[in-house]
Structures are given as C-alpha cells and as structure tokens.
Image (cartoon, rainbow, N blue to C red):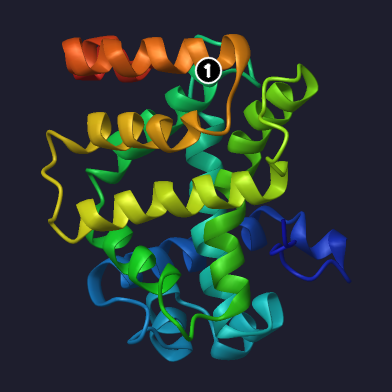
Amino acid sequence: MVDLKENGDRPQTYSSPAIIERRRRILEETRKVIAEQGIAALSMNEIGQRAGVAKRTLYNAFQTRERMIATAIQEYFDEYVSRIVYSSPPGTMQHNLERMISVVQRNRKIRNYIKAIMALYFSSDVDRDIWTAMHSPAIHHNKQWIEALDATKQLQPWVQVDKLVDDLVRFEYATINDWAQGRIPDDEVIVRLVSSYLSCLLGSLKGAARKEVEALIKDIAERGMDALPMSPKTKTKAT
C-alpha cells in the first residue's frame, strides 16, 4: 500500500490539534467536492477556499492535487472499515464477506461519491496514486482469506495468490460500479455481489473451502439476504 500520509519532515508540527483539525477539514471538503462535482472539476483553489486554508498549505501538506485526492479516498475507506464489528475472525470467508457487505451498505448512502471514484478507477488515464488508493484497501482483506486458504492447501495448484486477489478486487469493484451506474438495483446489489464473487472464486478452490463456498452459494440462491454472514451492526440495520 502506498503511504499517502503527509510528508513527515516535521512530525512535531503534525501532532498539533489545530493542524490535525485542518487536515481533517481539507480531506472532508475534498470528498464533498468529489461527490458533488466529480474529480475532473476538483481544484486546489476551491478546496482551499472551502477548507479555509491557503493553496500553498495544500501543496505543503500533500505535494500534488492527485495525492490529496488519493489520501481523501484511502483514509475514508480505512476509517470506515476500522469501525466494522465482525462476528468472524480475520482470514475467514465470513470475515471478508462481512467487510464487503458492510461497505456496500455504506455505499448506498453515498452513491454520488462512489459513482465518481469508480468512474475514475476504471478510467484509462487515472493517476497512479489515486488508482492505488482505491485498489489497495480491498487487497488486504481479500488477501488475508486467500493466504489462509493457500497455507492450508485449499487452492488449486495453478492459482497464484497475488494475481487471484487482484482479480477478486477488480471483480468486486466492477460490480459496485455497475450498481453505481444504475445497472444493478439497490435491493439486489449485495446478493448479486456476494453470489457472483463466490461463483468466480469457486474454480480456484478445492477441499473443504470449495465445499463451504458451494454450500453458501446454494443457501444464498434459496434464502437470499438471510443466508449472508453480516456483522452485528449491519445485521441490525438490515432487519
């Protein structure tokens, strides 16, 4: 994962409550502009005015417009995921699915923002820092599970862990993008994402992991949302 924090040449400055609050304001206004206008229209001048800071301050903190956008995107995702209360331990199918489901539930409340960043993710000329800021957070949670399967010899011999994880993230985001564009209804997106994701993964699995995934896919086909593993907080909101 790329380090998108502010330059650390003067750590004593960045520990100041005023500086921390200013940084929070800058990133919050950046995300608001992304949701309101998209990324193409975002300018350092507007962010400076909205956050009440000089344009020079933005460049001192983030060096470039692209790094400021990337930091806003990545930290927003990381902060949300860190607050998910899981029922299952890391490195399990259930843990990863709880994360996916919780994120999609959050996405439904910020559709314009998600639509803007997904359009950028799939753009042919997206800045590398911004693309990495969107791609890398989902890598970690998928990789925990896939590495656990690899360690217990439950992956097919032709599978390469890093490539499989990359493909899973791309599939996850492609489905979210289709939802954001209105091609998948709100009330179908979670079941569609999870069942399709697991179906794509099935060919890479063997042994107990394959049986577990097959059983869940069948259960989802029969019971829909009721079959899905959700965090306690998400389950409360869904009922």
Residue lying at 58% horizontally and 26% vertically, measured from the top left:
205
- Regarding residue 150, the answer to whether it shows in the image is yes
In-image side of 196 versus 162 (left or right): left
Instruction: Measuring from the top left, give residue 136's x and y in whole percent.
Output: 62, 54
Mark 1: amino acid: Arg
Nearest the viewer among 187 and 41 is 187
Q: List the single residue furthest toward the front.
A: 157
Residue at the spot of label 1 = 210
Q: Quadrant of residue 47?
A: bottom left
Nearest the viewer among 56 and 199 is 199
Instruction: Measuring from the top left, give residue 7's x and y in whole percent.
Output: 79, 71
In-image side of 155 versus 7 (left or right): left
- Regarding residue 229, the answer to whether it shows in the image is no
In-image side of 71 versus 179 (left or right): right
Q: Quadrant of residue 238?
A: top left
Q: Is the residue 214 above or below the residue 74 in the image?
A: above
Instruction: Measuring from the top left, give residue 108's x and y in whole percent.
Output: 22, 43
Residue lying at 61% horizontally and 12% vertically, measured from the top left:
207
Instruction: Measuring from the top left, give residue 193's x and y in whole percent.
Output: 31, 37
Crowding at dot 1, Cα within 10 Å, few <14 / some 14-19 / many 20+, comes out as some
Which corner quadrant holds the N terminus?
bottom right
Number of labels in the image equals 1
Q: Is the residue 152 above or below the residue 182 in the image?
A: above
Which corner quadrant holds the C terminus?
top left
Please, what secondary structure does the residue beneath circle 1 have?
A: helix
